Image: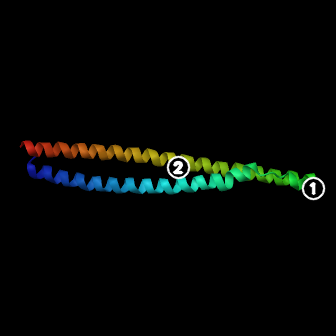
Amino acid sequence: MNRSEKRIEIKKLDEQLKEYEDDLVMLEETYKVIKLDYESIVKDVYEPTKTYDMTPLKIYGNDIYEGAEEHRKKIVVEIRKNLKDTEKFMSELLVAKKNIQKAIQECEDKRKSFEAELDIS
């Protein structure tokens, strides 16, 4: 590979690095937003719903109380399913982030190698 071709490869690697860095920023921002929303749902919706006491409804009859309690339990189960899906997605975002960081390192290593070859020749 001649000097001109090496310079072209370095330029391509620089462009690829920029793309990877943009992707990394997007992933980090997405993760932060989702994590904040997730924590808010757990704190403001899931936990209060899970611990909500339906016993005051017993004054209206056991059927009302049991129906409300069953409905509350169904809501908790559905929220928990969605929280699990969100946790999985957040985990996948972290894996994607690590993969992009690895690709960035590989590009940087290739770039340094080409630069070293240019310095030698």
Q: Which mark is residue 40?
A: none
Dot 2 and dot 1 residues touching (CB under 8 Å): no
In the image, taking residue 115 as reference, residue 49 lies left or right, namely right
Query: In which quadrant will I find the C terminus?
Result: top left
Please, which residue is most extreme toward the left here?
Answer: 121
Task: Name the residue located 79 percent from the left edge and 53 percent from the top edge.
Answer: 71
Determine the secondary structure under disc 2: helix
Q: Count how many numbered circles sit on residues in the image.
A: 2
User: Label 1: how many residues lie within 10 Å, few (<14), some (14-19) or many (20+)?
Assistant: few
User: Label 2: how many residues lie within 10 Å, few (<14), some (14-19) or many (20+)?
Assistant: some
Task: Name the residue located 7 percent from the left edge and 42 percent from the top edge.
Answer: 120
Q: Which residue is label 2 attached to?
A: 89
Query: In which quadrant will I find the N terminus?
Result: top left
Residue 11 point in image, percent of width and height:
19, 55
Toward the viewer: 65 or 59? 59
Colour style of the rendered protein structure: rainbow
Residue 109 point in image, percent of width and height:
24, 42
Question: Disc 2 vs disc 1: which is toward the camera?
Answer: 1
Task: Name the residue located 66 percent from the left edge and 48 percent from the top edge.
Answer: 80
Residue 32 point in image, percent of width and height:
49, 54
Q: Which residue type does callout 2 highlight?
A: Phe
Q: Which residue type does callout 1 highlight?
A: Ile
Residue 118 point in image, percent of width and height:
10, 46
Measured Cα–Cα span from mark 2 to mark 1 = 43 Å
Which mark sits nearer the N-terminus, 2 or 1?
Answer: 1
Determine the secondary structure under disc 1: helix
Q: Which mark is residue 59?
A: 1
